[in-house]
Image (tube, rainbow, N blue to C red):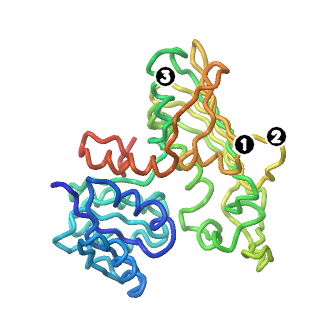
């Protein structure tokens, strides 16, 4: 693949996650050149193409099926960032066209769909990248360095308590109207397990290796959810089906013992930690903690880092920095350490 990598972007509209963070961090990376955009709306894609082509280079606008952007000879790599229920329709034409790709997490709306993507890409010999950027955070990089230094000795166990509080309105008894279409709808791949735990597991496995075996249990504590509008009014009350409390334990291939408990929907009361991750070694421990309502999303914000009880300062570039590192890692080719559809 030559440089800069000529990139087509599916879902880079005038608003949303792609326009706020994914698009800007990619276009600011010298390894990539945005050459085409595809959305579902002719009007929005023309606006986006005009915005990103304002520096003088042409950005082709496509709308509707992704077959057009996938077959464009001026596109070497395609980034896909649409809502997870639409990933299959967007991605399959790109794989069939033989183009390497980025797919936002969760890759598929189910394990079976994700496996389908992975196998299709493998059969075509395609490089892949998945949007689990937490492994590139400054804190996680520092944790790796501390473990490698031997400061806490051999890591024996890791324990996590994570909470996504009610005030976030993703899961539990209150869900925002904006989130309800994905996080509250069964089969969209946007449950507590898919999003918060899924992002965390990529970091865990990147640090310590894959599971040798695991046991899990879950419960639905809040069987109904009030759907809350932007003006705080309750627009409806709907039954829920995805578990909002999940626990699992097991042993990794490295021998590290894992214990985790995750809760969705509890109130963010004073003094309640929303995230705690202990890594215990024979000679000491590493702790990551947070009380911010979003602290459990360590793929978005950095928690506090402690080694043997002492605070360790870490220079953080935040979420934009994590994303920027991910793009750069992909550009390094097979030497990159970004997440892929076959990452273990």
| Closer-to-camera residue (41/21) | 21
Q: Which of marks 2 and 1 is nearer the N terminus?
A: 2
- Mark 3, residues whose alpha carbon is within 10 Å: few (<14), some, or many (≥20)? some
| Placement of 16 over or under 327, stated as above or below | below
Say whether marks 2 and 1 touch (CB < 8 Å).
Answer: yes
| View extreme (top): residue | 283
The picture places residue 214, in percent across and down from the top left corner, at 56, 38
Q: What element carries label 1?
A: loop
- Residue assigned mark 3: 147
CA–CA distance in space, label 1 to label 3: 24 Å
Horizontal side of residue 221 vs 141, given as left or right: right
Could you tell me which residue is drawn at 74 percent across and 53 percent down? 165
Say whether marks 2 and 3 touch (CB < 8 Å).
Answer: no
Could you tell me which residue is drawn at 78 percent across and 56 percent down? 221
CA–CA distance in space, label 2 to label 3: 29 Å
- Residue assigned mark 2: 271
Horizontal side of residue 69 vs 156, given as left or right: left
Q: Earlier in the sequence, mark 2 or mark 3?
A: 3
| View extreme (bottom): residue | 43
- Residue assigned mark 1: 291
Quarter in which the N terminus is drawn: bottom left
- Mark 2, residues whose alpha carbon is within 10 Å: few (<14), some, or many (≥20)? few
| Closer-to-camera residue (103/299) | 299
Image quadrant where residue 178 sits:
bottom right
Q: What element carries label 2?
A: loop
The picture places residue 16, in percent across and down from the top left corner, at 51, 70
Could you tell me which residue is drawn at 65 percent across and 68 percent down? 184
CA–CA distance in space, label 2 to label 1: 8 Å
Q: Residue 179 carries which label?
A: none
């Amino acid at each position: 693949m030559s440089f800069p990598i000529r990139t087509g972007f599916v879902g880079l509209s005038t608003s949303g996650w792609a326009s706020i963070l994914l698009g800007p961090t990619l276009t600011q990376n010298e390894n990539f050149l945005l050459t085409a955009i595809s959305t579902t709306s002719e009007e929005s894609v023309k606006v986006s193409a005009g915005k990103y082509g304002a520096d003088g280079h042409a950005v082709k606008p496509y709308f509707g099926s992704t077959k057009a952007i996938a077959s464009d000879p001026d596109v070497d790599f395609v980034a896909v960032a649409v809502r997870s229920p639409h990933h299959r329709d967007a991605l399959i034409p790109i794989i069939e066209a033989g183009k390497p790709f980025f797919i936002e997490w969760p890759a598929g709306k189910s394990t079976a769909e994700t496996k389908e993507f992975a196998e299709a890409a493998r059969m075509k010999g395609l490089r892949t990248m998945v949007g689990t950027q937490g492994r590139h955070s400054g804190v996680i990089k520092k944790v790796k360095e501390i473990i490698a230094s031997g400061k806490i000795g051999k890591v024996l166990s890791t324990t996590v308590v994570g909470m996504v509080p009610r005030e976030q309105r993703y899961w539990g008894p209150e869900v925002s109207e904006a989130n309800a279409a994905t996080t509250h709808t069964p089969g969209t791949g946007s449950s507590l397990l898919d999003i918060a735990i899924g992002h965390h597991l990529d970091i865990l496995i990147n640090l310590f290796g894959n599971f040798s075996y695991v046991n899990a249990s879950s419960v639905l504590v809040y069987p109904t959810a009030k759907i809350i509008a932007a003006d705080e009014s309750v627009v409806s009350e709907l039954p829920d089906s995805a578990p909002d409390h999940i626990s699992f334990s097991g042993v990794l291939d490295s021998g590290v013992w894992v214990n985790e408990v995750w809760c969705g929907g509890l109130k963010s009361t004073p003094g309640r930690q929303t995230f705690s991750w202990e890594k215990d070694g024979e000679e000491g421990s590493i702790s990551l903690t947070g009380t911010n309502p979003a602290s459990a999303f360590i793929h978005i914000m950095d928690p506090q880092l402690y080694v043997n009880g002492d605070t360790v300062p870490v220079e953080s570039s935040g979420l934009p920095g994590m994303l920027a590192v991910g793009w750069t890692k992909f550009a390094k080719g097979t030497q990159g350490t970004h997440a892929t559809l076959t990452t273990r």
